[in-house]
Amino acid sequence: MEKLNKTHQQQPYAFSMPVQYVDGGQDSRKTLTEDELEVKAARQYIKVQKRLMKEMDIRRESLGSLGQSQSDLYPNEKAEVISTGPFYLDKCIGGSTVGLFRPLMKVVEERSAEPAVPCGVTWPCSGFFSCAVLQKTGEPPLINGWIPYLGKALIFRKDAFKFLLDQQKKLGDIFTVHIAGRYITFIMDPFQYVYVIRNSKQLEFHEFADKMASKTFDYPALSNGKFPDLKENLHRIYQYLQGKPLDIISDHMMKNLQDIFEWKCSQATDWETEKMYKFCCSVMFEASFVTLYGRVPAADGHKVISEIRDKFIKFDASFPYLAANIPIELLGATKKVRKELIHHFLLQNMTKWLGGSKVVQARQDIFEKYELLGDYDKAAHHFAFLWASVGNTIPATFWAMYYLLRHPEALAAVRDEIDHLLQSTGQKRGPTYNIHLTREQLDNLVYLESALNESLRMCSSSMNIRISQEDFVLKLEGNQEVGLRKGDWIALYPQILHMDPEVYEDPKEYKFDRYIENGKKKTTFYKAGRKLKYFLMPFGSGISMCPGRFLAMNEMKMFLFLLLAHFDVELVENKAVRLDNSRMGLGILLPDVDIAFRYKLRALRM
């Protein structure tokens, strides 16, 4: 017999909450229940929504006085404007959803009113919020949440890691969570990952990613039928990021990094102090830009790239909201900044740059075959490729450098390995010497790679998403089955795996040699006595795995190699840098603060 539980369709339903009293007193030291945390988060959420709606009302009145319609305010808005935004909700509101959120605010305000409110009441709900449907046999336990439409979105956003662990303890390794109108089924057991990853026919990723990217970077979706085979043609180009072509582009990256470090050497006659994230961003952005798109021939080429970088940083700050489908009109100057960035990549500008990569040239050649793809659209694609190249690599480089400087024994081991390689290959270090590294030599730097993998384990927070293309039963190990409906999301959250004490001893501690065993790379990790196929997943999985992961790893290794070969480096500030969870689910987390370090040229003893 089927139970009333899962909420996909529009049917009358009463939202209820277990009897619970919300503490409105002074003592904030006591441990809050999950419901109390949700109420607290809801209050903060309401404040943001009120401010945003006030801004929207002002804009609407302004448009009205000019005789314009609401569609002029949000020309690309659709009714489901926030339906694809499970990650970030503090600005999650658009013109077409005002009627949705005003009744929501009334419900939440009444629920969160002070003084203490007895919560055993049921709240009638109809229209958009009415959503009860029969839960089918075989479907996982559903965590619905009491806030209309949002479900568990607020508590999930606050601390997804803790929330998912708590649900796993209560419900087991498979459960569904209602988050911002979406039903996301989480698979928590890493031994079951393979059954999701290999099932690419029923569980699709590319269409979801295409829609998100097209809205974020302002180009027409590849799947809209106007551009036959464009997606497949672009995918084939990733061959330039593997094998021999990877060696070529890595060599160019090494040369460009050395040019930048040589310039840094000329400035660092004594100790130079900089902010670490800003330093990593400056070096990695310029080296990546020149490697991919070519050198700006103007005398002020460095200045031009710095200006593009500064705009990129401003855009990147809004990326989580754009990825969550927040209208760009609500994000301050982001729309203007995005347009300016895209204009840098118009053909008349790119033709002036010298020495671009084959992968970018191949993309240009393909775009020229599609007449319906305008010049602005092509430029937007190039800008999106730039973001994909550096958006996660820059923070990952920061964390690798930060953890090395935080742990002197790690720094010493990696530097000894670097010095040994230079000595064994007869290469000299210093601003006037070019260092050449083969792929084999890079791969054999086991301490460097282990330290890098360890920092990736600790700072990555990607959520691997697939969308069910039809109603079907996903078969898992141990004769387990999961009933999924068309449109349901299924998610792997590798951060849970990365911080599992069964897999990694003392997972919250940085251990630079965690991925080394008997002097060689360690690739065997166990859980419950069984060998894991997947134990480190910073680059996604299966069809959603980052195609540029090999280049990204090479770039970060080369950055750290040259930094430690040329400079003595040390932290200036003794403060803890923590993960900023605002990008939860989107890749590498940023630091919550920047930190000062200093560097100077190493004495030439070789």
Image (spheres, rainbow, N blue to C red):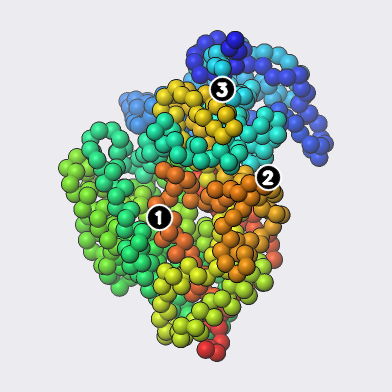
Rounded to the nearest angstrom, the CA distance separating label 2 from label 1 is: 33 Å
Give the residue at mark 2.
Answer: 528
Q: Say which of 104 and 253 sits in front.
A: 253
Q: Which residue is mark 1?
A: 548
Task: Name the residue rendered at 35%, 32% in the picture.
Answer: 76
> Residue furthest toward the bottom?
605
Q: Is residue 282 left or right of residue 496?
A: left
Point out which mark residue 139 bears.
3
Secondary structure under the numbered disc 3 in the rendered image: loop
User: x, y (%) of residue 310?
Assistant: 43, 58
Left or right placement of residue 225 versus residue 588 in this view: left
- 37 and 94: which one is in front? 37
Does label 3 or label 2 sit earlier along the sequence?
A: 3
**Picture quadrant of residue 118:** top right
Q: Earlier in the sequence, mark 3 or mark 1?
A: 3
Q: Could you tell me residue 380's position as x and y percent?
A: 31, 47
> Marks 3/1: CA distance?
36 Å
Residue type at mark 3 is Glu
Foreground tag (2 vs 1): 2
Q: Nearer the viewer, mark 3 or mark 2?
A: 2
First along the sequence among labels 2 and 1? 2
Rounded to the nearest angstrom, the CA distance separating label 3 from label 2 is 26 Å
Q: Position of residue 525 (x, y in %)?
A: 61, 53
Residue 601 visible (yes or no): yes
Residue under the image location 63 percent in, 61 percent down: 514
Residue at image coords 38%, 29%: 77
Amino acid type, label 2? Ala
* Residue 158 position by quadrant: top right
Q: Position of residue 287 (x, y in %)?
A: 40, 66
Residue toward you, 576 or 100: 576
